[in-house]
Image (spheres, helix red, strand yellow):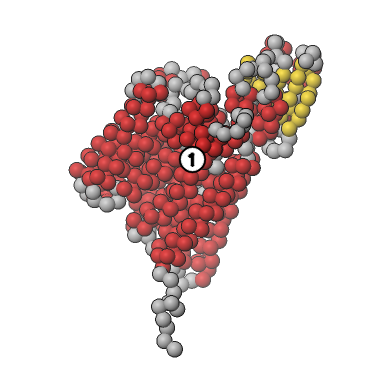
Amino acid sequence: MPATAQDAPPPTWWSDSRAVLAIVAVSLGAKLFLASHYYGFLTGDDVEVVQAAAKYALGFEYQPWSLRCLFHPALLVSPFVKVLAGSGPAFDPLRVAWAASLPAMLASTASIGMVFRFAVVLRAPRRTAVLASAFFATHYLPLAYGSMPFPRPISTMFFLAALLAAAEPSRVRAFLGGVLVAAAFAVRFSEGILLLPFLWFLWRRHRSAALVVVGAAGALFGSGLFVGLVDAATWGRPFASFFEFFRIMYFERTSAFWRADKPWFWYATSVLQWAGPAALILVFLSWSRAQARTALVVVAAVVAGYSVFAYKAYRYLQAAIPFLAIAMAFGYGRLLESERRWRRWTGVLLAALAVGWSVERTVSLMRDRSMDAVDAALLLGHRQGGLLVLEQGWAYGGRLILGNQVAIRDLPPQTPLGLEPSVLQGADAAAFYQRDLSKSDLDVLREAGFRRIGRFDRYRKPVAVFERRSR
């Protein structure tokens, strides 16, 4: 009996698209779970975003840091907070924080499809492009930070969209690409370095100086739109936050900033920490593929650009991860094409190790969030006044959870804590990391009239809560 059209196998593009959609769905589900289960904060930058978004969505009383362009929290995050956390009889800080995480979840998830499309633009076989999207989706930087209210998953999406726009030889698309790079710049000013790989890609792809100029013009226009106008509306002066960024970060730096500085080569020497050992092997194998080299140049440009900044953190390199994933997929494809079975199995093993390493890093990073401190803050947040002494106050959610009725005396974390009686003067409650409390610290608390009223130790950073006995 002759085969019919109904019996024919589905087109490759359809099966590949379904694979990408499955990766997208699993990734989004994982992020929704991570955001709900690990409800604390990680660095303080995330608390900042949530409080600024709550200010514009719900009228929450909060003064953002003057060096922040409010394009991200006010325009991209606050609508989600308003819709998802603005209803109900009472202000729910955990619901607000979860709603503020949704833009990063959606942006990092949308980037999975963009990685697939960009790999195809680089003439990768479609199955290789699917694998690139899977490597990106499971890498711990987009997976973990895409589950929290951090800004860079969103700026990474803008950068990917800019490169996809620039893939065709069109002045309109080149201009639009520049505007999208400016949107990434408005999300975080350090993302301005992404303009260089964007313009390089325009030149590499089309060999047109005119398109490069148009792309740069789009970036200037977008900067005026997303930074100039937004700053005028929120800070009262165009580019106010941009000038404040340079004033605070470079011209009037405090000693705390200098202590956080790292040498220019730190990203290169710590590549195993942010890329992963299996990823490096796959990237090395990809070098023989001309298509992979474009992705590797973008990775190198992003890492080199961020190496110029003295303050460094792995999460700043998120814009490099889509292109790292593409290069990894090319390296994996090279192993699979080998006629030797051991090489094909080596590829499968390296892919499994890359995914397993990233999942472990994701869980470890999420467990570092301050869930115990948040639980302690919920215990203390009912107070209508008084003074709280806290170690690392942002970990408790700051004003978001503790409210504006109390005064907060914030102590930097250190082991041992080394409490002085003067620090507790006038306070009626306090909370510290259990690991930092020495016997001497406990003696100081006892002599000042404090008793422990709670200990929260479900997660990695247990917190002890104290209250003055007179209350």
Q: Is residue 134 above or below residue 103?
A: below
Residue shown at 70% from the left, 14% from the top: 427
Position of residue 383 in the picture relative to residue 211 (left or right): right
Specify the quadrant of the image occupied by residue 122: bottom left
Count of marks, rendered view: 1
Q: Is residue 323 above or below residue 334?
A: above
Residue shown at 53% from the left, 51% from the top: 27
Q: Which residue is mark 1?
A: 103
Q: Secondary structure at mark 1?
A: helix
Residue shown at 76% from the left, 19% from the top: 467
Q: For the C terminus, give its image quadrant.
A: top right
The residue most toward the bottom is: 1
Q: Position of residue 366 (x, y in %)?
A: 61, 41
Q: Tag 1: Cα neighbours inside 10 Å, few (<14), some, or many (≥20)?
A: many
Q: Nearer the viewer, residue 421 or 153?
A: 153
Residue 333 visible in this rendered orientation of the protein: no
Residue type, label 1: Pro
